[in-house]
Each structure stands twice: as structure tokens, then as C-alpha cells.
Image (cartoon, rainbow, N blue to C red):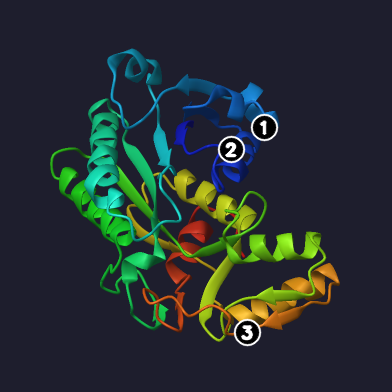
Amino acid sequence: MKVLVTGATGFIGRHLIPELLQAEHAVTVIIRDVERVKQFLWSEHVGLIVADIHKLEDCWLRQIGEQDALMHLAWPDLPNYQELVHVEKNLPADYAFLKKIVEQGVEQILVTGTCFEYGNQSGVLNENSPTMPNNPYALAKDSLRKYLQALQQDYPFVLQWARLFYMYGEGQNSNSLLAQLNDAISSEKSIFNMSGGEQLRDYLPVDIVAKYLLGLVECQDCNGVVNVCSGQPISVRRLVERYLEQRNVKIILNLGYYPYADYEPMAFWGDQQKLQNLLKRNNSVEN
């Protein structure tokens, strides 16, 4: 397949590109910063289009050429979920870009969504659960999905909405939980400040997420929303404790230092059944 990718140097993208190349797909990435992409060994094995996807210009749109699929991972201004820029700027700009890609004849679009689209619903969540976004980032993502589904009425393209849950691994945002824990370990701190840790979440290593996304894009006629998740709830406290055990590090957890987020329920996780059924059908990776 010829696969176009945005967000290639981001948290997921840096893990996804090697998976695509190993599977012998022809990869082209749209990037804003050439110097940043040079730090990755795979940069010499992909096509490069230097552009800002939120500034549509014929000079770089013509470079896209024929592509079998777009994997759209890019989204700016994270992890500031409460900022109105997601609705006021990123949503219309993203839709304009994706519509242009569809108009140019790309027949398969994979977009990464977010579990925050489910809002404050608790328990196990599947793709048929209603969306109830309660922050601007989630609202923008959920609205983008609906815009693209409406666009399918005029253009016969496959839309794969990969609804991501929680991830960890190399390249994660420095403000994320395990990244902060890594910093505390590196700094040889004796105490780590965190929330009460009783909230239940659904976590996956980012390299597994990359394999799942590869499996989805290779399932070229699989249309609709798919939870990309482990299907297994774990408390945040247990996640941290398990990580410390794996690192063989002792550190005191200062539980309750931070309040629980008001835009998340205390306990929610994803239903993985649809994901696994699609991967089995495509003889792809399972976990």
C-alpha cells in the first residue's frame, strides 16, 4: 500500500512508521520540521512533504500524488484538553485538510480519536456507547468524526476512526504520569506526588498501539469506529507500582497530592472485541 501519514514524529507516529516500513508499505509523511524528522533512522526510507496541513496550498498538495490511505495522527495543542482552540481552530482546519485529501481521490482515511469522546460514562465502553464529550478537545474530535461521516454521503471513502485510550512508552508527553515518574527516578527523588490512584483506566504500550493501527489500515474495507485499547482495567496506583517493580526502584508514593480530573469518571475502560475481530479477520497482530 501507499500510505500517507501526518504526525509521524509524534508519540504514536515515531513507533508506527517502522511498523509500516517493516510491512513493506510505501510511506510518505507530511511534516513541518525537516530537522526534527532527521533524528529518526526511518527518515531516509520515507517520502517527505514539508507542509503545514492547516495551510492548504496547491504547491504541496500536488506532491501527495496517488495514495491508498491516509493515517491522520496529527493534532496540535495537546495535552491542553480544555482550550477552545481545539473547537475554534483545529476542528475546521482539520476537516478542510481531510476533505481536500478525499477530494483528491484517497479512498481510505484512518483518524485517531480519543476515549474522551465518551465523556463521563463509567464502566466498560464499546463502540455503540453514545458519545458525550465534556471538554473542547473531545468535542472537536467527536465533531470531526461526524463531519467526516456526513462527507461520506458525497464521497465513497472508508473512514476508520481509531478511538485511542491511554498509552505509555518512549516519546510520551513529559507531563504524562509515567514520564513524570521516570523523571523522579532519574532525579533519585524519594517521593513521587500523584493523585489518589484509585481511578481505573485502560492502558496500552505505544508500540502495541502502533501494531494495532497497522492492522487496521491493512483492513482496507473496515469502516467505522474502533476502540484501540487493552480491554483490561487497571488502577493508576497499580500501574505506577508495577512500573516501579519492573524498574526495581523504591520510591514513596504521595497519594492524594493531586485532585482527580473533573472531566473523567473514576472507572472506565474499553471493549476490545471489535478490534480483535478485525485483526483476526485480517490475520494481523493480537494481544
SS category of the residue bearing label 3: loop
Question: Which residue is most to the top?
Answer: 59
In space, the residues marked 3 and 1 are separated at their CA atoms by 37 Å
Q: Which residue is mark 3?
A: 255
Look at the numbered discs 2 and 1 and tell me whether their residues touch, using CB distance below 8 Å. yes
Q: Which amino acid is tagged 2? A: Ile
Q: Residues within 10 Å of mark 3 (few under 14, many from 20)?
A: some
Residue drawn 80% across the image and 59% down it:
186
Inspect the image, locate mark 1, and give the three-letter code of the amino acid beneath it. Phe
Q: Are marks 2 and 3 in contact (CB under 8 Å)?
A: no
Q: CA distance from mark 2 to mark 1?
A: 10 Å
Q: Position of residue 62 (x, y in %)?
A: 33, 15
User: Which residue has dot 2 on it?
Assistant: 17
Disc ID at residue 217: none
First-in-chain label (3 vs 1): 1
Q: Which residue carries the number 1 mark?
A: 40
Residue at x 44%, y 52% (from the top left corner) = 78
Q: Residue at x 40, y 76 (%)?
A: 264
